Image (cartoon, coloured by chain):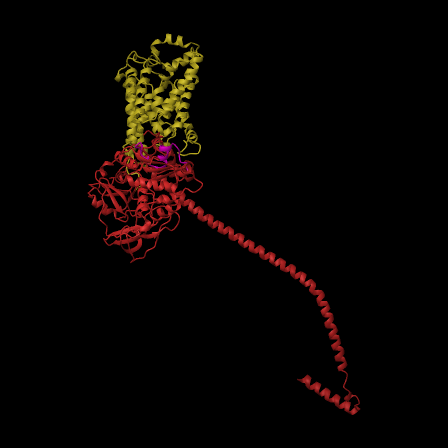
Amino acid sequence: MHSSPYIQNNENVSRMMLAVIYALIPGTLVYIHFFGFGVIINILIAVITALICEVAILKIRNRPIKPFIYDGTAVLTAILLALALPTLTPWWLPALGAGFAIIIAKHLYGGMGYNPFNPAMVGYAMLLIAFPKEMTAWIPAETHGLNFFDTLNYSFFETLPAGMNYDALTMATPLDSIKTQLSLGYTLDEIHTANSSLFGNIAGYGWEWINIMFLVGGIILISIKVISWHIPVSILGALAFMAMIFNFSDAGSYPPISFHLFGGAAMLGAFFIATDPVTAAASNKGRLIYGAGIGVLIYIIRTWGGYPDAIAFSVLLMNMAVPMIDYYSKPAVFGAPNKG
Amino acid sequence: MTTRLWKIFGGLKLPGFKTMSMSQATETPPLPKILVLPLKQHIGHAAEAIVEVGDIVLKGQMIAAAKDYVSSPIHAPSSGKIIAIEQRLVPHPSGIATDCIVIETDAEDRWIENEDAINANYRQLDAGVLRDIIRDAGIVGLGGAGFPSFIKLNPGSNHMVNTLILNGAECEPYITCDAMLMQEHSRKIIDGLNIMRHALQVEHCIIAVEDNKRAAHTMLVNALQEHEAEYIDIIQVPTLYPAGGEKQLIKTLTGKEVPSTGLPINIGVVCHNVATAASTATAVLEGKPLISRYVTVTGEGVSHPRNLDVLFGTPFSQLIDLCDRNSKAEQFIMGGPMMGFEVSDDNLPVIKTSNCILVQSKNTKPKFVMPCIRCGQCAEVCPAQLLPQQLYWYARAKNFDKTQDYNLFDCIECGCCSYVCPSHIPLVQYFRFAKTEIWAQEQEKKTSDIARQRHEFRQFRLERKKAENEERKRQKRELLKKVSGEKDSAEDSKKAAIDAAMARVKAKREKQSITPENTGNLTEAQKKTIAEIDSRRKKAKDEN
């Protein structure tokens, strides 16, 4: 006989995770449109690997398999990881990343609900450090000329159609090239003029649309109350604030707010990655601090750090700070003496 | 009337299920054959039986008296014979049996004659006298915990009460007994409010009703017009669970928060339930003690859910049957689905706090409990503004000190967190467990503190005794020493006296031992004979 309450709403973890996966669809479709079928191939490889690893580990840990497979967290981790990878990659890259995320970052820390670090970002960070060349080479948006089978062929056999060469085909992302060229002494205007096809209207050809669609998905998630607004708003706010200050002080060397908000993985990170509840701060006040920390770190790493984008490291660094944030952001209880 | 209302934090919009039990007027069930009246129906001390098995009692006769300050008497709900005073199962979350008085009713339902108990002119009575009447009528809070009402009407001289609130919010799903009472006895409620107001000597009164109870609100407004009491405001509060929680209601109406570990009285507010007010009016104006209450019998397990005016001691089963029990009647909950508790069977008696009997089918199987994903939905809905997930974490780890750091005891057990948890964690159950453990530990600590104090006192006592003995011995020794010093000189003189006496005696004896004169002039032959005789005597003496 259990105690009250005897009624519950219909919410459950699977529904929440499914909602997040559905909200990723618009951004993912646009991503496929610009960067080819590598996106979907990466997602499939990562999801299958993640599920295999999840089942194997649950078996070893003697946990019930069905509820933890249906909760959807392993699938979501795999999708988020795959969306962060370059689209023309050998198959083992998403497989290795997903396996690492599930086995090391998730289950070795106690499984769902207990992992202190965002598993997808741990997988991504591991790949970025271990395979920097594969992880930073992207094909150009829309003009790559690869169809589904070409991409599949490259994924499994690392062969490209006749006349194509991996090094010639791939290039740095807009974020990456800006950083490299700024360090070579060019101004933003010069970089833009020299690479007009790369930069598009606001934040990189293709990338700006992907970000807009992830923003749409994120707003849907907030409106159906799967995530709260605190983390995305504070990340984007802090990022915009940093960009504004530096752009205002030296517009020639620091890209404008729009470039940071709609470039790279800003929206995916703000709405889908940093909002992973397990690894984020718990209270609303804590979430604002957590998000602001991520936003500031993204700007710092993008601008002065050694890596092209900064979502993974910013999120992981703030994951570390979560226990402390939680401790110091306890809300005052009803009737607390310091309240009115 | 436009009144400013304050927003409470958290809460839930729950499906009401209220109209189902409000379609018909409240009925009085037939008189049961047997009435079972538990002596303990609320926190505080159990009442003490003042009748014996075999006694004949009348309706309204006191059968158990309050034993302590936080205690309330119990009255016979109908006339009849006491057939047992024994342990019976009672409606309680722990499913325990406690002492009960069992009455076999005589079907006559004869009232005890007590004309003196009617106090229509209560306004001339002293507040203390009024409180005594209310206490002796066995009136307790009918909204939930059943706390003796007269105590809440006794603020003490160090508290200023400026607002008296009657709680008619009734925010929990299914329960409609207060709503029905407000519809059917609005005048009595206002009478009761006036009596309470007099007892508290408070100026401003509020009756709070959730805005989904339109009929109840209308009836109260109509009744108030007859009374012309401009010091009473009838205020509709938003329908939101748990808007009727005492602290939440006070916040909604006054904007003030009852201090975290305090009582409403700390901010000058006293809050009573509407049904408590109605029974206060009955007690004071009609001289009738609390022997019945409105009970909602509802849920999918009864085909005709409704409200009943039930004598205390009536078995649940009779009421469920009266409302047409159906095949879904498997689980019986006293109270609502959010804060009530399941009882083992339907044969338990209605007590003062039985506001609702919820009859429903058993959930086929419990939902699988997933790990906490820290989504924070529990914190969003917690009206006490706690962090349930952190509390859960520490309660599960039995880290009870930490649970208190996270203000476990501010949890009102409203169940909102469990309701929304996507992982289906029975959070409130963990919090109840933690509270019970902490109470047990404190009790243990108290006991061991007492034991330690006793031990320490014993040690102290033994040591003191020892020290006292030492001291006494020392004093004795000193005294002895002193006395013996005096004795020496005294003995000397004594000895001298004795010696002198001895000397005198010796001298006297020497004088006396001079050879007698008659043997002085003896002849040699005579001397010789004597000597022979002497030596022979001596010899004989030696031989012997």
> Is residue B244 located in the magenta-colored stretch of the structure?
yes
Q: Quadrant of residue B334?
A: top left
Residue depicted at 37% across the width and 9% down the height: A192
With respect to residue A192, does A62 lie above or below?
below
Q: Nearer the viewer, residue A193 or B365?
A: B365
Q: Quadrant of residue B238?
A: top left
Q: Is residue B262 left or right of residue B487?
A: left
Chain A takes which shade in the image? yellow
How many numbered discs, if any?
A: 0
Residue A151, x across and y down, in percent: 28, 17
With respect to residue A55, does B65 lie above or below?
below
Q: Quadrant of the N terminus of chain B?
A: top left
Q: Nearer the viewer, residue B108 or B467?
A: B108
Residue B67, x across and y down, in percent: 38, 51
Q: Residue B263: in sight, yes or no?
A: no
Look at the image and give the residue range highlighted in magenta. B236-260
Residue A76, x across and y down, in percent: 31, 26
Residue A54, x across and y down, in percent: 31, 31
Residue depicted at 41% across the width and 16% down the height: A243
Q: Residue A247: in sight, yes or no?
A: yes
With respect to residue B81, does B355 lie above or below?
above
Chain B takes which shade in the image? red
Q: Quadrant of residue B536?
A: bottom right
Q: Nearer the viewer, residue B123 or A118?
A: B123
> Is residue A229 located in the magenta-colored stretch of the structure?
no
Q: Quadrant of the C terminus of chain B?
A: bottom right
